Amino acid sequence: MCVVVKTRQLSEDTTTRQANKPKLHWPGIEPGPPAWQASILQNFAELEDVIGELTKVLQSPPKPRPGGRQRGRGQCDPNQEAKRIQQLYKTNRKKAMRDIRQEDSPLCEVPGDEVANYFEDVFKETITELPPLPASAVLPPTQRQDPMLVTTIDKETITARLVRCSETSPGADGVTYSIIKRKDPGAHMLAVMYNSCLRYKRIPAAWKESRTILLYKKGDKGDLGNWRPIALSSCLYKIYSGILADSLGRRAASTGAVS
């Protein structure tokens, strides 16, 4: 599949972006960031637009629920149902088993305000004063010039990481690992995204968003203590952060930073 994404010229929306950009006050200078930083921010905003377009390419429209899973609406074709289960098993074994055993996760019927108040109280921030670090824990600066942790991310590295990813529910963008594998088999789009993020040392704001769902454990469904919140992050971001984590782990092991 060949995908061509047309990006706008940087000069097209410069006036609009500058007019809508919030004014930042920097100490000792005129209101607004320095010229070099404003240029980076503007170019990264363009990059976010491009990544947003690429994400739309990877998105798939929601599929209607198969007729065989809707009780009381007639029987489905056994051959089609068997084919669906086989395809689902290749991408998500746990969901395939839930479908076979008809173990749909129930929905939480507790009012949303009560849910929000309950979990805000459970996960409220607590301020803990940590003791100062001992002198032995502070490492002296080294004179050795180490190479950069990651300079570029090649398509082979992305593909290898993607193979290790188990199918999970998608984040807010709706992009799953199976969709990525199917629509970008050579990791061409991902390589463009990730190397651009490396160059700018930033990630799109959309990757910092997640959607939270409640999974039922056991017991009374009206007791929120019997529900477990799960934050679903963007699969695109999880691949990127996983690659960086792998590189950091290899560097730490090779330098003896960890044993």
Image (tube, rainbow, N blue to C red):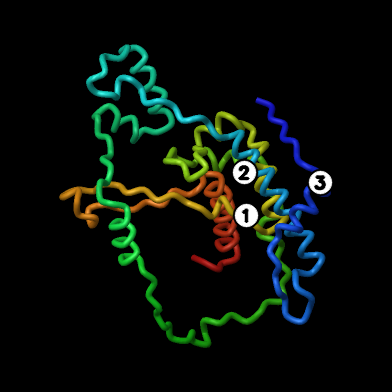
What residue type is disc 3 on?
A: Glu
Judging by the rendered image, the residue that carries numbered circle 2 is 157
- The vertical placement of 34 against 67, above or below, is below
Judging by the rendered image, the residue that carries numbered circle 3 is 12
Q: Position of residue 118 (x, y in %)?
A: 29, 61
Q: Who comes first in sequence, dot 2 or dot 1? A: 2
Give the number of the disc on residue 140: none
Q: Who comes first in sequence, dot 1 or dot 3? A: 3
Q: Position of residue 236 (x, y in %)?
A: 56, 45
- The vertical placement of 94 against 254, above or below, is above
What residue type is disc 1 on?
A: Ile
State the residue at coordinates (28%, 57%): 114
Q: Position of residue 150 (x, y in %)?
A: 67, 56
- The crowd level at tag 3 (other Cα within 10 Å; few <14, some 14-19, many 20+) is few
CB under 8 Å between callouts 1 and 3?
A: no
Q: Residue furthest left?
A: 220
Q: Who comes first in sequence, dot 2 or dot 3? A: 3
Front tag of 1 and 3: 3
Could you give the CA–CA distance between mark 2 and mark 3, rounded to whole angstroms?
A: 35 Å
State the residue at coordinates (49%, 65%): 259
Nearer the observer, 215 or 88: 215
Residue 249: name its quadrant: bottom right
Could you give the CA–CA distance between mark 2 and mark 1, rounded to whole angstroms?
A: 19 Å
Answer with left or right where residue 153 lies relative to residue 124: right
Judging by the rendered image, the residue that carries numbered circle 1 is 203
Nearer the observer, 18 or 237: 18
Q: Position of residue 220 (x, y in %)?
A: 16, 50
